[in-house]
Image (cartoon, grey):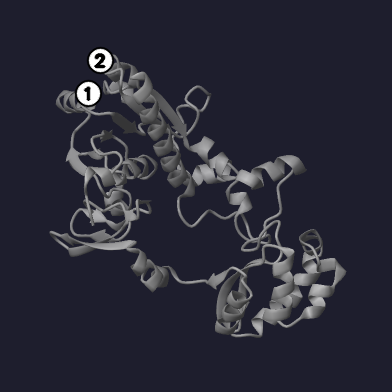
Amino acid sequence: MSDTPSLLPLSGIRVLDLSRVLAGPWCGMVLGDFGAEVIKVEHPERGDDTRDWGLRIGNTETAYFNSVNRNKRSICLDLQTPEGQQIAQDLAQQCDVVIHNFKFGGIDKLGLGYAQLSKDHPELIYCSITGYDTSGPEAARPGYDLVVQGESGLMAINGEAHQPPLKFGVAAVDLFTGMYSAQAILAALFERQRTGKGRHIEMALYDCGLMITSYYGLESLLLGQDVPRYGNAHPSIVPYGVFDAEDGPLVITVGNNSQFARFCCEVIERPDLAEDERFKNNIGRSANRAILMPELTREIGSRKRKLLLERLTAAKIPCGEVLGLHEALTSKRTNDAGLVTTHAHPVAGSVKVLAPPYRFDGERLPVRSA
Protein backbone atom coordinates (compact mmCIF):
# COMPACT_ATOMS: atom_id res chain seq x y z
CA MET A 1 0.00 0.00 0.00
CA SER A 2 1.43 3.38 -0.99
CA ASP A 3 2.56 5.86 1.67
CA THR A 4 3.20 8.76 -0.68
CA PRO A 5 2.29 12.37 0.18
CA SER A 6 -0.38 12.30 -2.54
CA LEU A 7 -2.17 9.59 -0.58
CA LEU A 8 -1.91 11.47 2.73
CA PRO A 9 -3.79 14.79 2.53
CA LEU A 10 -2.29 16.23 5.74
CA SER A 11 1.30 15.34 4.90
CA GLY A 12 3.54 18.20 6.13
CA ILE A 13 1.18 19.23 8.94
CA ARG A 14 2.59 18.83 12.45
CA VAL A 15 0.36 18.39 15.52
CA LEU A 16 1.28 18.67 19.19
CA ASP A 17 -1.15 16.44 21.08
CA LEU A 18 -1.15 17.42 24.75
CA SER A 19 -4.41 15.57 25.41
CA ARG A 20 -5.03 12.31 27.23
CA VAL A 21 -7.62 9.53 27.60
CA LEU A 22 -10.13 9.60 24.70
CA ALA A 23 -11.71 12.71 23.14
CA GLY A 24 -8.48 14.63 22.49
CA PRO A 25 -6.40 11.58 21.51
CA TRP A 26 -9.17 10.49 19.12
CA CYS A 27 -9.01 13.91 17.45
CA GLY A 28 -5.22 13.62 17.16
CA MET A 29 -5.50 10.12 15.73
CA VAL A 30 -7.87 11.31 12.99
CA LEU A 31 -5.33 13.94 11.97
CA GLY A 32 -2.58 11.31 12.09
CA ASP A 33 -4.64 8.99 9.90
CA PHE A 34 -4.79 11.78 7.32
CA GLY A 35 -1.00 11.98 7.32
CA ALA A 36 -0.19 14.65 9.89
CA GLU A 37 2.90 14.16 12.05
CA VAL A 38 1.36 13.84 15.52
CA ILE A 39 3.62 14.25 18.56
CA LYS A 40 1.87 12.89 21.66
CA VAL A 41 3.12 14.23 24.99
CA GLU A 42 2.83 11.89 27.98
CA HIS A 43 3.75 11.92 31.65
CA PRO A 44 7.29 10.51 32.09
CA GLU A 45 6.29 7.97 34.75
CA ARG A 46 2.71 6.84 34.15
CA GLY A 47 2.16 7.96 30.56
CA ASP A 48 -1.39 8.43 29.33
CA ASP A 49 -3.97 7.17 31.84
CA THR A 50 -5.23 4.64 29.31
CA ARG A 51 -1.92 2.74 29.37
CA ASP A 52 -3.40 1.26 32.56
CA TRP A 53 -6.95 0.58 31.28
CA GLY A 54 -8.21 -2.74 29.96
CA LEU A 55 -6.25 -5.62 28.48
CA ARG A 56 -2.46 -5.37 28.57
CA ILE A 57 -0.30 -5.49 25.42
CA GLY A 58 3.41 -5.82 26.10
CA ASN A 59 4.66 -3.93 29.16
CA THR A 60 3.32 -0.40 28.70
CA GLU A 61 0.37 -0.58 26.31
CA THR A 62 -3.26 -1.68 26.43
CA ALA A 63 -5.89 -2.32 23.80
CA TYR A 64 -7.64 0.87 24.98
CA PHE A 65 -4.49 2.99 24.57
CA ASN A 66 -3.69 1.54 21.15
CA SER A 67 -7.25 2.11 19.92
CA VAL A 68 -6.84 5.90 20.04
CA ASN A 69 -3.13 6.44 19.41
CA ARG A 70 -2.23 4.86 16.07
CA ASN A 71 -0.23 6.95 13.60
CA LYS A 72 1.42 9.03 16.37
CA ARG A 73 4.85 9.34 17.96
CA SER A 74 5.11 9.66 21.72
CA ILE A 75 7.48 11.64 23.93
CA CYS A 76 7.57 12.04 27.72
CA LEU A 77 7.64 15.49 29.30
CA ASP A 78 7.09 16.55 32.89
CA LEU A 79 4.98 19.62 32.31
CA GLN A 80 5.19 20.53 35.99
CA THR A 81 8.87 21.47 35.55
CA PRO A 82 10.26 24.57 33.80
CA GLU A 83 12.33 22.33 31.52
CA GLY A 84 9.33 20.30 30.39
CA GLN A 85 7.26 23.42 29.85
CA GLN A 86 10.00 25.03 27.76
CA ILE A 87 10.34 21.97 25.52
CA ALA A 88 6.56 21.90 24.99
CA GLN A 89 6.51 25.63 24.23
CA ASP A 90 9.34 25.21 21.72
CA LEU A 91 7.56 22.27 20.08
CA ALA A 92 4.32 24.25 19.81
CA GLN A 93 6.12 26.98 17.88
CA GLN A 94 7.11 24.35 15.31
CA CYS A 95 3.59 22.89 15.00
CA ASP A 96 0.55 23.81 12.95
CA VAL A 97 -1.95 22.47 15.50
CA VAL A 98 -2.07 22.08 19.28
CA ILE A 99 -4.70 19.90 20.98
CA HIS A 100 -5.28 19.77 24.73
CA ASN A 101 -7.96 18.75 27.22
CA PHE A 102 -6.50 20.17 30.44
CA LYS A 103 -8.88 21.36 33.12
CA PHE A 104 -10.10 24.92 32.70
CA GLY A 105 -7.23 27.35 33.33
CA GLY A 106 -4.68 24.59 33.88
CA ILE A 107 -2.98 24.96 30.53
CA ASP A 108 -2.28 28.67 31.07
CA LYS A 109 -0.32 27.92 34.24
CA LEU A 110 2.06 25.84 32.11
CA GLY A 111 2.68 28.68 29.67
CA LEU A 112 0.87 26.73 26.97
CA GLY A 113 -2.37 28.71 26.66
CA TYR A 114 -3.59 30.01 23.32
CA ALA A 115 -2.81 33.66 24.08
CA GLN A 116 0.69 32.71 25.19
CA LEU A 117 1.53 30.52 22.19
CA SER A 118 -0.21 32.53 19.45
CA LYS A 119 1.61 35.72 20.39
CA ASP A 120 4.69 34.52 18.53
CA HIS A 121 2.84 32.04 16.30
CA PRO A 122 -0.30 33.71 14.88
CA GLU A 123 -0.74 30.89 12.34
CA LEU A 124 -1.29 28.35 15.13
CA ILE A 125 -4.56 26.40 15.20
CA TYR A 126 -5.29 25.63 18.83
CA CYS A 127 -8.04 23.24 19.94
CA SER A 128 -9.21 23.22 23.57
CA ILE A 129 -11.47 20.35 24.64
CA THR A 130 -13.34 20.83 27.91
CA GLY A 131 -16.34 19.36 29.66
CA TYR A 132 -18.55 22.45 29.52
CA ASP A 133 -18.78 25.93 28.01
CA THR A 134 -15.69 27.86 29.14
CA SER A 135 -17.70 31.09 29.28
CA GLY A 136 -20.41 29.63 31.51
CA PRO A 137 -20.78 28.94 35.25
CA GLU A 138 -19.64 25.30 34.88
CA ALA A 139 -16.40 26.13 33.09
CA ALA A 140 -14.24 24.57 35.81
CA ARG A 141 -16.19 21.28 35.97
CA PRO A 142 -14.22 18.28 34.68
CA GLY A 143 -15.79 16.49 31.72
CA TYR A 144 -16.53 12.77 31.80
CA ASP A 145 -18.31 10.88 29.07
CA LEU A 146 -20.67 8.97 31.35
CA VAL A 147 -21.66 12.10 33.28
CA VAL A 148 -22.45 13.93 30.05
CA GLN A 149 -24.38 10.94 28.69
CA GLY A 150 -26.61 11.32 31.73
CA GLU A 151 -26.87 15.12 31.69
CA SER A 152 -27.50 15.45 27.94
CA GLY A 153 -30.41 12.99 27.89
CA LEU A 154 -28.55 10.38 25.86
CA MET A 155 -29.01 7.68 28.50
CA ALA A 156 -32.73 8.48 28.60
CA ILE A 157 -33.17 7.58 24.91
CA ASN A 158 -31.13 4.38 25.05
CA GLY A 159 -32.42 0.93 25.96
CA GLU A 160 -35.84 -0.65 26.32
CA ALA A 161 -38.86 1.24 27.66
CA HIS A 162 -39.16 -0.94 30.77
CA GLN A 163 -35.46 -0.56 31.69
CA PRO A 164 -33.71 2.26 33.58
CA PRO A 165 -31.61 4.76 31.58
CA LEU A 166 -28.75 3.00 29.80
CA LYS A 167 -25.34 4.22 28.71
CA PHE A 168 -24.05 3.56 25.21
CA GLY A 169 -21.76 0.56 24.74
CA VAL A 170 -18.83 2.85 23.88
CA ALA A 171 -17.95 6.32 25.13
CA ALA A 172 -20.02 7.98 22.41
CA VAL A 173 -19.70 11.55 23.71
CA ASP A 174 -15.90 11.36 23.84
CA LEU A 175 -15.73 9.80 20.39
CA PHE A 176 -18.08 12.33 18.79
CA THR A 177 -16.27 15.20 20.50
CA GLY A 178 -13.01 13.92 19.05
CA MET A 179 -14.52 13.75 15.56
CA TYR A 180 -16.18 17.18 15.84
CA SER A 181 -12.84 18.60 17.02
CA ALA A 182 -11.00 17.10 14.06
CA GLN A 183 -13.60 18.57 11.69
CA ALA A 184 -13.13 22.01 13.23
CA ILE A 185 -9.35 21.76 12.92
CA LEU A 186 -9.62 20.73 9.27
CA ALA A 187 -11.89 23.74 8.62
CA ALA A 188 -9.39 26.04 10.35
CA LEU A 189 -6.51 24.61 8.30
CA PHE A 190 -8.49 25.26 5.13
CA GLU A 191 -9.30 28.82 6.23
CA ARG A 192 -5.64 29.48 7.10
CA GLN A 193 -4.69 28.90 3.47
CA ARG A 194 -6.76 31.97 2.58
CA THR A 195 -6.08 34.21 5.59
CA GLY A 196 -2.70 33.08 6.90
CA LYS A 197 -4.14 33.22 10.41
CA GLY A 198 -4.82 30.54 12.99
CA ARG A 199 -7.83 29.98 15.23
CA HIS A 200 -8.68 29.09 18.82
CA ILE A 201 -11.23 26.27 18.65
CA GLU A 202 -13.19 25.46 21.80
CA MET A 203 -15.07 22.18 22.03
CA ALA A 204 -17.18 21.02 24.99
CA LEU A 205 -18.26 17.45 25.70
CA TYR A 206 -21.71 18.63 26.82
CA ASP A 207 -22.29 20.56 23.59
CA CYS A 208 -21.33 17.54 21.48
CA GLY A 209 -23.36 15.15 23.64
CA LEU A 210 -26.47 17.25 23.15
CA MET A 211 -25.88 17.30 19.38
CA ILE A 212 -25.93 13.48 19.27
CA THR A 213 -29.59 13.49 20.37
CA SER A 214 -30.29 14.72 16.79
CA TYR A 215 -33.83 13.80 15.65
CA TYR A 216 -34.73 12.46 19.10
CA GLY A 217 -33.83 15.85 20.55
CA LEU A 218 -36.01 17.79 18.12
CA GLU A 219 -38.93 15.38 18.60
CA SER A 220 -38.67 15.82 22.37
CA LEU A 221 -38.85 19.60 21.94
CA LEU A 222 -41.89 19.22 19.69
CA LEU A 223 -43.62 16.93 22.18
CA GLY A 224 -42.68 19.01 25.20
CA GLN A 225 -41.61 15.86 27.01
CA ASP A 226 -39.33 12.82 26.74
CA VAL A 227 -39.73 10.70 23.65
CA PRO A 228 -40.65 7.02 24.17
CA ARG A 229 -37.82 4.47 24.14
CA TYR A 230 -38.05 1.61 21.67
CA GLY A 231 -34.81 -0.29 22.31
CA ASN A 232 -33.76 -2.00 19.09
CA ALA A 233 -36.89 -0.89 17.24
CA HIS A 234 -37.17 2.32 15.24
CA PRO A 235 -39.20 5.17 16.80
CA SER A 236 -40.80 6.14 13.48
CA ILE A 237 -40.64 3.16 11.08
CA VAL A 238 -42.43 -0.19 11.50
CA PRO A 239 -41.19 -2.91 11.17
CA TYR A 240 -37.58 -1.82 11.54
CA GLY A 241 -35.23 -3.32 14.12
CA VAL A 242 -33.79 -6.49 15.61
CA PHE A 243 -35.92 -9.65 15.55
CA ASP A 244 -35.37 -13.16 16.88
CA ALA A 245 -35.52 -15.92 14.30
CA GLU A 246 -35.84 -19.51 15.47
CA ASP A 247 -32.05 -19.85 15.69
CA GLY A 248 -30.70 -16.33 16.25
CA PRO A 249 -31.22 -12.59 15.92
CA LEU A 250 -31.28 -10.61 12.68
CA VAL A 251 -31.90 -7.05 11.56
CA ILE A 252 -34.88 -6.32 9.31
CA THR A 253 -35.42 -2.81 7.95
CA VAL A 254 -38.68 -2.37 6.07
CA GLY A 255 -38.30 1.19 4.87
CA ASN A 256 -41.42 1.84 2.77
CA ASN A 257 -44.89 0.55 1.97
CA SER A 258 -43.93 -1.52 -1.08
CA GLN A 259 -41.24 -3.25 0.96
CA PHE A 260 -43.82 -4.02 3.64
CA ALA A 261 -46.11 -5.63 1.06
CA ARG A 262 -43.24 -7.79 -0.21
CA PHE A 263 -42.21 -8.64 3.33
CA CYS A 264 -45.69 -9.90 4.17
CA CYS A 265 -46.21 -11.82 0.93
CA GLU A 266 -42.76 -13.11 0.05
CA VAL A 267 -40.98 -13.43 3.40
CA ILE A 268 -43.48 -14.38 6.10
CA GLU A 269 -46.30 -15.48 3.76
CA ARG A 270 -48.96 -13.33 5.42
CA PRO A 271 -50.67 -11.39 2.58
CA ASP A 272 -53.55 -10.65 4.93
CA LEU A 273 -51.31 -8.27 6.88
CA ALA A 274 -50.34 -6.41 3.71
CA GLU A 275 -54.02 -6.01 2.79
CA ASP A 276 -55.10 -4.81 6.24
CA GLU A 277 -56.05 -1.12 6.00
CA ARG A 278 -54.44 -0.45 9.39
CA PHE A 279 -51.02 -1.47 8.08
CA LYS A 280 -50.98 -0.27 4.46
CA ASN A 281 -48.83 2.79 5.18
CA ASN A 282 -46.16 3.50 7.76
CA ILE A 283 -48.25 6.05 9.65
CA GLY A 284 -50.85 3.34 10.21
CA ARG A 285 -48.27 0.72 11.11
CA SER A 286 -46.71 3.08 13.66
CA ALA A 287 -50.11 3.93 15.16
CA ASN A 288 -51.01 0.22 15.36
CA ARG A 289 -47.57 -1.00 16.39
CA ALA A 290 -48.94 -2.86 19.43
CA ILE A 291 -51.28 -4.90 17.20
CA LEU A 292 -48.91 -5.58 14.31
CA MET A 293 -45.66 -6.38 16.08
CA PRO A 294 -46.81 -9.51 17.97
CA GLU A 295 -47.96 -10.99 14.63
CA LEU A 296 -44.62 -10.24 12.96
CA THR A 297 -42.60 -11.43 15.94
CA ARG A 298 -44.43 -14.75 15.94
CA GLU A 299 -43.95 -15.30 12.20
CA ILE A 300 -40.25 -14.39 12.26
CA GLY A 301 -39.62 -16.51 15.34
CA SER A 302 -41.02 -19.60 13.62
CA ARG A 303 -38.47 -19.52 10.78
CA LYS A 304 -34.73 -20.15 10.50
CA ARG A 305 -32.50 -17.10 10.13
CA LYS A 306 -30.86 -18.37 6.92
CA LEU A 307 -34.23 -18.78 5.23
CA LEU A 308 -35.39 -15.34 6.32
CA LEU A 309 -32.19 -13.68 5.11
CA GLU A 310 -32.49 -15.42 1.73
CA ARG A 311 -36.10 -14.34 1.33
CA LEU A 312 -35.44 -10.80 2.51
CA THR A 313 -32.54 -10.43 0.10
CA ALA A 314 -34.62 -11.77 -2.77
CA ALA A 315 -37.37 -9.28 -1.88
CA LYS A 316 -34.78 -6.45 -1.84
CA ILE A 317 -35.37 -5.64 1.81
CA PRO A 318 -32.23 -4.53 3.71
CA CYS A 319 -31.30 -7.13 6.32
CA GLY A 320 -28.38 -8.73 8.13
CA GLU A 321 -27.26 -11.03 10.91
CA VAL A 322 -26.57 -9.75 14.42
CA LEU A 323 -23.00 -10.86 15.03
CA GLY A 324 -20.89 -11.04 18.14
CA LEU A 325 -18.08 -8.48 18.29
CA HIS A 326 -15.30 -11.01 17.77
CA GLU A 327 -17.33 -12.65 15.01
CA ALA A 328 -17.67 -9.31 13.24
CA LEU A 329 -14.00 -8.39 13.64
CA THR A 330 -12.86 -11.73 12.20
CA SER A 331 -15.48 -11.96 9.46
CA LYS A 332 -14.67 -12.28 5.76
CA ARG A 333 -16.29 -8.87 5.22
CA THR A 334 -13.89 -7.21 7.67
CA ASN A 335 -10.90 -9.14 6.37
CA ASP A 336 -11.63 -8.35 2.72
CA ALA A 337 -11.88 -4.64 3.54
CA GLY A 338 -8.52 -4.67 5.33
CA LEU A 339 -10.01 -3.17 8.48
CA VAL A 340 -7.89 -5.16 10.96
CA THR A 341 -4.12 -4.97 10.50
CA THR A 342 -1.29 -6.85 12.23
CA HIS A 343 2.00 -5.19 13.15
CA ALA A 344 5.25 -6.34 14.74
CA HIS A 345 5.57 -5.52 18.44
CA PRO A 346 8.89 -5.54 20.34
CA VAL A 347 7.43 -7.27 23.41
CA ALA A 348 4.13 -8.90 22.42
CA GLY A 349 5.48 -10.24 19.12
CA SER A 350 2.61 -8.81 17.11
CA VAL A 351 -0.36 -6.58 17.74
CA LYS A 352 -3.65 -6.02 15.91
CA VAL A 353 -4.72 -2.47 15.13
CA LEU A 354 -7.91 -1.26 13.45
CA ALA A 355 -7.20 0.50 10.17
CA PRO A 356 -8.50 4.02 9.38
CA PRO A 357 -11.96 3.97 7.77
CA TYR A 358 -10.98 6.50 5.10
CA ARG A 359 -10.35 5.63 1.44
CA PHE A 360 -8.79 8.13 -0.95
CA ASP A 361 -8.70 7.38 -4.68
CA GLY A 362 -9.50 3.74 -4.05
CA GLU A 363 -6.88 3.14 -1.35
CA ARG A 364 -7.39 2.89 2.40
CA LEU A 365 -5.18 5.30 4.34
CA PRO A 366 -2.40 3.25 5.95
CA VAL A 367 -1.50 2.44 9.54
CA ARG A 368 2.00 3.95 9.52
CA SER A 369 2.61 3.12 13.16
CA ALA A 370 0.60 0.96 15.52
Amino acid type of disc 1? Gln
Q: Position of residue 136 (x, y in %)?
A: 53, 24
Quadrant position of the C terminus in the picture = bottom left
**Residue 106 seen in this snapshot:** no
Left or right of residue 288, residue 239 in this image: left
- Which residue lies most toward the right here? 277
Q: Which mark is residue 20?
A: none
Residue at left 29%, top 38%?
10
Q: How many labels, in total? A: 2
Quadrant position of the N terminus in the picture = bottom left
Q: Compared to 277, does 126 lie above or below?
A: above
Marks 2,1: beta carbons within 8 A: yes
Per the image, the residue denoted by label 1 is 93
Q: Secondary structure at mark 1?
A: helix
Mark 1, Cα crowd under 10 Å, few <14 / some 14-19 / many 20+, is some
- Which residue lies most toward the top here? 119
Per the image, the residue denoted by label 2 is 120
Left or right of residue 293, residue 64 in this image: left
Identify the mark nearer the N-term, 2 or 1. 1
